[in-house]
Image (spheres, grey):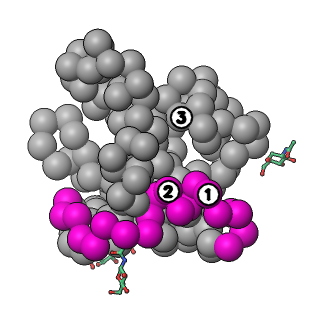
Amino acid sequence: MSARRPALGLLLLLLCPAQVFSQSCIWYGECGIAFGDKRYNCKYSGPPKPLPKDGNDLLQELCPGLFFGNVSLCCDVQQLQTLKSNLQLPMQFLSRCPSCFYNLMTLFCELTCSAHQSQFLNVTVTEDYFDPETHENKTNVKELEYYIGQSFANGK
Ligand SMILES: *[C@@H]1O[C@H](CO)[C@@H](O)[C@H](O)[C@H]1NC(C)=O
Ligand SMILES: *[C@@H]1O[C@H](CO)[C@@H](O)[C@H](O)[C@H]1NC(C)=O
Ligand SMILES: *[C@@H]1O[C@H](CO)[C@@H](O)[C@H](O)[C@H]1NC(C)=O
């Protein structure tokens, strides 16, 4: 991932009325293996999808800011599970600073799941992927670009 033009972004997104921004995703679900048991997310540029009920507990635990009943997101339950396991390491490092961990978790939640994802993320490198389970052609997201608001990045 490369950070370009840190302007606009998440903070603005959080402050502005949701209707101002169109809702659309850059990814949904997991695709081909990147390394080990890590997988790329699948490219998807449609509207956010309703989170299945069995994802509610995870969402409430990881992304309380996104949790409000019947929510539509750009991540599925598997991505939330991956997010949780990816947060185990930073959680150890940041165990003495719960608010730092909370900020990091919120940031990763927004990046992974926000219904307005396409406003601050651009897919730059992809790869074809054939899903052996569904027999569908899909696309791995290998690299992306993002904007993060300066104030959000500073944790203010
Ligand atoms: C929740 O979403 C489902 C599927 O989109 C819909 O059928 C249901 O009516 C919604 N429930 C509420 C309370 O909005
Ligand atoms: C995404 O790409 C478009 C077109 O190349 C560009 O105008 C836009 O600023 C980019 N957005 C991000 C978040 O990098
Ligand atoms: C998937 O892509 C391959 C190669 O491009 C093509 O031959 C095949 O028909 C596609 N399968 C489906 C289900 O679209």
* Percent coordinates x, y for residue 99 in the rendering: 41, 25
* Percent coordinates x, y for residue 143 in the rendering: 21, 64
Residue under label 2, please give it. Answer: 11
Residue 15, numbered label: 1
Q: Secondary structure at mark 1?
A: helix
Left or right of 108, for residue 11 = right
Q: Secondary structure at mark 2?
A: helix
Residue under label 3, please give it. Answer: 63
Q: Residue at x 35, y 28 (%)?
A: 100
Classify residue 145 by image quadrant. Answer: bottom left
* Residue furthest to the left: 35
Q: Residue at x 31, y 67 (%)?
A: 6
Graded by Cα atoms within 10 Å as few (under 14), some (14 to 19) or many (20 or more), the crowding at tag 1 reads: few
Classify residue 98 by image quadrant. Answer: top left
Do the numbered discs 2 and 1 sit on residues whose CB atoms are within 8 Å? yes
Graded by Cα atoms within 10 Å as few (under 14), some (14 to 19) or many (20 or more), the crowding at tag 2 reads: some
Range of magenta residues: 1-20
- Precedes in sequence: disc 1 or disc 3: 1
* Residue furthest to the top: 96
Q: Secondary structure at mark 3?
A: loop
Q: Is residue 3 magenta?
A: yes
